[in-house]
């Protein structure tokens, strides 16, 4: 039973608070079971409103004392519910007052990992979105910004909070953050930690101390993260003109963390998986993610912290923009072509998937029950795409002018999407009324293209349509930038990229003076987050794969050929065309191309992508057949490209000179792709040698996967033997065994692993390894016709929900595509969702997710 009926919060209900905060002083005496928090908060009246009540958020707090202007409040002078304390206006001075309170909390009992909690013996915090209210009574809303002074008393040797260190006397440390900030950016860390330290000199010549704090023994895994931080600091100065604004920047790695990392002012807290790395333990993908996430959190210092969100509906204001910035940064560091393909792969895998099901919502949602459920691919990744489109429409120079205006106009403020778009309107004179629909209209638009050619004039007729999504039946036409170039029949580009602005349901665009009908390269660079419905002839796609000057569309041409081959195989067993296999082989063997790009061309769509492809083609996806068909196509590619793959395997050797840079990583990616394709043909000896000879985790893990696929029964024990002392590598061990189990054995493998002594299910990384290893890593196993995968997931979600609702709710999205499948599977999933929905004590988090997934289901009509 839920404690109180969950309330829906609406954007349209936003009102300013009656009281602003001028200054905050917090005083912590840390104790695992009984931490005391004393607060002293200076409130001033919001003069725009009538003199009103004071509302303070507070959850799970034992209130010991409360006073206003030094006079203790008796219990009948305020009202208290489970989540809010209200002091009536009549009890409050006219213009300003000081609130003082003392509360007691128990960080050791906080398994939800929100508020102040303990991880591996250290104290740490996670306050975004609404965790600060579990620390003390406060107006826990992002539009209330104030400078904080924090005093911490503890026997722990390292005591950290936001801002600059002010004093340290024995067990007491004091920190002061001069920059006004909302409570969600508050952080505190106390532990027996060691730092890897360095410094950065800003462009105006200030020296900033940099520290990465880790548990003893992890010091040797911090160097890469430090380099990434310094690169990010330099880049933000050079590209956005943004300089760091405190004397110290601290990063702390924590093992138990619900998400990737958190941008607390001056004290970023990270899931240790996105900090700790050395070549033997981290893959190239890990290095890339670490660099991107370190940069992302650092960039929040300006886009999120100095300028924050007025309310949580504006989340994309900071997240979409910061993702866009980290994507630009990673592209600059590692190459834009491959980065764009990776980003689009991720967008389609997560955001398009979300947008095509019951959890679809706009980039700026209009209501929520639990805000933590809206840290989604739509808010983050589609939010970043919307900014990319804006930049493309106004041009680079205007984008820069608009951003400069944004920083000067809104520094120190809590802003909205309206404020964001206004700076673009003011900087460019452009009316963005229609463009703004991207923020309010959910769903992935589909654009269809028709071509005609007459007397040297080529005409593209482009239409757009967005299907209805939950709660939004009517869709309006959007502003869609469609980047198009034209390739002549001989493979030479005859028209360079031009951005067509689609604003109507249907529009024609003309290209004059062409000698022959061209092959269009549409949506270059994936210029808009849309589905392009256009099936050019096979030869035209092969031509684009061979000759397109736009690397994204060159890759896309190959991908669409792969997708189509898979669909034909699934439909009626048509074998892949020899010309397709040839075209793929040619690109794979083209030494003029970046190895990372060649690896991406060889990679087949994931099983989940194929399932969505089936739905788009009007087929009901059968996960088991998809799994086997994909494997079959891989083996046919391997047969056809055998010589090329052998050459790649022999040539792309990076051993002996390990570097995590993009060029070396690209070579490893290509070589490991060759290994994956060749192993099923030749058996395990090559993979065994690869495993034995690996001097880095990228190669070792690639070989580990091949050997698991090949049914090697000893390799898992060997890997365990080598790595059981390393938490992050052990997460991979759990995940890989499930992802690479034969579909019929995946659920039993997952069950066996949940009984392993190293399965610490309360650790979100470990939990995710197993659950995502099955639901995302082994779709055919998860969708086992018996329904065992569904029952397994539901059992674990219910168990985790009781201790950590946030992670349970997030993992429940494994069910979001349930209406894609056959009626038997739908029935079994629906039964599991209903079982969860009925469960006693279900959290608001998981309750909302399950409710949304069940809404509009057949039985509720
Ligand atoms: N802002 C945090 C995410 C907080 C998630 C709260 N459930 C990390 C980030 O996006 O940078
Ligand atoms: Zn972020």
Image (spheres, rainbow, N blue to C red):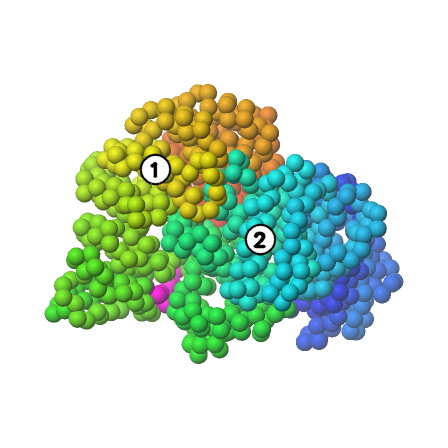
* Circle on res. 229: 2
Residue 742 % position (x, y): 39, 27
The kind of secondary structure the magenta stretch mainly shows is: loop
View extreme (right): residue: 71
Is residue 787 visible in the rendered image? The answer is no
Q: Check the image and name the residue furthest to the front.
A: 656
| Pointer 1 or 2: first along the chain | 2
Which element is circle 1 on?
helix
Label 1 or label 2, whichever lies nearer to me, is 1
Q: Quadrant of residue 480?
A: bottom left
Marks 1/2 in contact by CB < 8 Å: the verdict is no
Residue, x 18% and y 43% (percent of image)? 579
Q: How many marks?
A: 2
Where residue 651 is drawn, which disc sits there? 1
In the image shown, does 651 or 520 lie closer to the viewer? 651
> Is residue 110 toward the left or the right of residue 439 in the image?
right
Marks 1 and 2 sit apart, C-alpha to C-alpha, by 33 Å
Q: Residue at x 80, y 60 (%)?
A: 40
| Residue 227 seen in this snapshot | yes
Vertical order, 334 against 687 (above or below): below
Residue 471 rendering spot, x and y as whole percentages: 44, 58
Location of residue 773 in the rendering, given as x and y in whole percent from the top left corner: 47, 35
Queried whether the magenta region covers residue 824, the answer comes back as no
In this rendering, position of residue 271 left or right of residue 189: left
Give the residue drawn at x 76%, y 61%. Answer: 24
Q: Is residue 10 left or right of residue 822?
A: right
Specify start and end residues of the magenta stretch as a single range.
473-482
Q: Nearer the viewer, residue 373 or 743?
A: 743
């Amino acid at each position: 039973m839920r404690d109180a009926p969950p309330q829906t919060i609406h954007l349209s209900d936003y009102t300013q608070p009656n009281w602003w905060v001028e200054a905050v002083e917090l005083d912590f005496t840390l104790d695992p079971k009984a931490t005391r928090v004393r607060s002293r908060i200076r409130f001033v009246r919001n003069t725009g409103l009538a003199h009103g009540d004071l509302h303070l958020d507070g959850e799970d707090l034992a209130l010991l004392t409360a006073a206003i202007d030094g006079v203790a409040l008796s219990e009948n002078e305020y009202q208290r519910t489970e989540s809010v304390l209200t002091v009536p206006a009549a009890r409050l001075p006219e213009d300003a007052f000081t609130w003082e309170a003392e509360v007691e909390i128990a960080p050791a009992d906080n398994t939800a990992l929100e508020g102040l909690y303990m991880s591996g013996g250290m104290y740490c915090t996670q306050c975004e979105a609404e965790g600060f209210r579990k620390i003390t009574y406060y107006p826990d809303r992002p539009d209330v910004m104030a400078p904080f002074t924090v005093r911490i008393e503890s026997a722990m040797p390292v005591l950290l909070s936001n801002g600059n260190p002010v004093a340290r006397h024995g067990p007491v440390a004091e920190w002061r953050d001069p920059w006004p900030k909302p409570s969600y950016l508050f952080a505190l860390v106390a532990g027996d930690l060691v730092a890897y330290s360095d410094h950065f000199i800003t462009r105006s010549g200030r020296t900033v101390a940099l520290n990465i704090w880790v548990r003893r023994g992890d010091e040797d895994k911090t160097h890469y993260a430090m380099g990434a931080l310094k690169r990010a600091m330099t880049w933000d100065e050079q590209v956005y003109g943004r300089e760091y604004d405190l004397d110290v920047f601290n990063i702390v790695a924590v093992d138990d963390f619900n998400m990737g990392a958190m941008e607390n002012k001056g004290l970023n807290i990270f899931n240790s998986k996105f900090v700790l790395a050395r070549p033997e333990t981290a893959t190239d993908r890990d290095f890339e993610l670490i660099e991107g996430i370190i940069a992302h959190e650092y960039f929040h210092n300006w886009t999120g912290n100095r300028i924050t969100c007025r309310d949580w509906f504006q989340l994309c204001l900071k997240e979409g923009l910061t993702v866009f910035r980290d994507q630009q940064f990673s592209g600059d560091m590692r190459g834009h072509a491959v980065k764009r393909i990776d980003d689009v792969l991720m967008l389609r895998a997560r955001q398009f998937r979300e947008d095509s099901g019951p959890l679809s919502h706009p980039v700026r949602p209009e209501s929520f029950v639990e805000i933590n459920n809206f840290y989604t691919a739509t808010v983050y990744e589609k939010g970043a795409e919307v900014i990319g489109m804006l930049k493309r429409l106004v041009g680079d120079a205007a984008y820069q002018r608009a951003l400069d205006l944004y920083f000067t106009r809104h520094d120190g403020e809590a802003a909205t999407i309206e404020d964001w778009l206004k700076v673009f309107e003011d900087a460019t004179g452009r009316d963005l009324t229609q463009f703004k629909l991207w923020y309010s209209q959910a769903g992935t638009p589909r654009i269809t293209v028709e071509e005609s050619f007459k007397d040297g004039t080529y005409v593209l007729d482009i239409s757009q349509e967005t299907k209805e999504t939950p709660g939004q039946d009517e869709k309006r036409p959007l502003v869609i930038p469609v980047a198009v170039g034209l390739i002549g029949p001989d493979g030479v580009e005859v028209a360079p990229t031009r951005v067509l602005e689609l604003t109507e349901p249907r529009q024609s665009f003309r290209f004059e003076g062409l000698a022959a009908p061209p092959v269009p390269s549409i949506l270059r660079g994936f210029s808009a987050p849309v589905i392009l419905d256009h099936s050019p002839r096979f030869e035209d796609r092969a031509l684009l794969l061979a000759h397109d000057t736009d690397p994204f569309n060159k890759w896309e041409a190959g991908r669409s050929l792969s997708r189509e081959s898979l669909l034909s195989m699934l439909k009626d067993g048509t074998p892949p065309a020899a010309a397709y296999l040839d075209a793929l082989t040619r690109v794979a063997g083209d030494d003029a191309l970046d190895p990372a790009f060649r690896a991406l061309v060889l990679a087949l769509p994931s099983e989940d992508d194929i399932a969505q492809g089936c739905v788009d083609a009007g087929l009901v996806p059968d996960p088991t057949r998809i799994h086997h068909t994909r494997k079959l196509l891989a083996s046919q590619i391997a047969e056809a490209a055998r010589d090329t793959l052998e050459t790649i395997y022999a040539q792309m050797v990076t051993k002996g000179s390990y570097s995590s840079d993009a060029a070396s990583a690209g070579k490893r990616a290509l070589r490991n792709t060759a290994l994956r394709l060749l192993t099923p043909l030749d058996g395990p000896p090559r993979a065994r040698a690869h495993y034995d000879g690996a001097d880095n985790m990228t190669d070792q893990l690639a070989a580990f996967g091949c050997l698991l696929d090949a049914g090697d029964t000893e390799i898992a024990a060997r890997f365990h033997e080598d790595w059981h002392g390393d938490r992050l590598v052990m997460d991979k061990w759990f995940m890989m065994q499930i992802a690479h189990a034969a579909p019929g054995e995946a659920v039993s493998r997952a069950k066996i692993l949940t009984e392993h002594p190293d399965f610490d299910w309360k650790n979100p990384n470990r939990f995710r390894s197993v659950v995502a290893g099955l639901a995302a890593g082994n779709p055919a196993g998860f969708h086992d016709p018996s329904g065992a995968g569904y029952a397994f997931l539901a059992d674990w979600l219910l168990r985790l929900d009781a201790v950590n609702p946030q992670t349970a709710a997030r993992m429940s999205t494994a069910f979001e595509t349930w209406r894609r499948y056959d009626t038997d599977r739908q029935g079994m999933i629906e039964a599991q969702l209903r079982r969860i929905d009925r469960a006693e004590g279900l959290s608001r988090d998981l309750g909302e997710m399950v409710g949304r997934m069940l809404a509009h289901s057949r039985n509720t009509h």
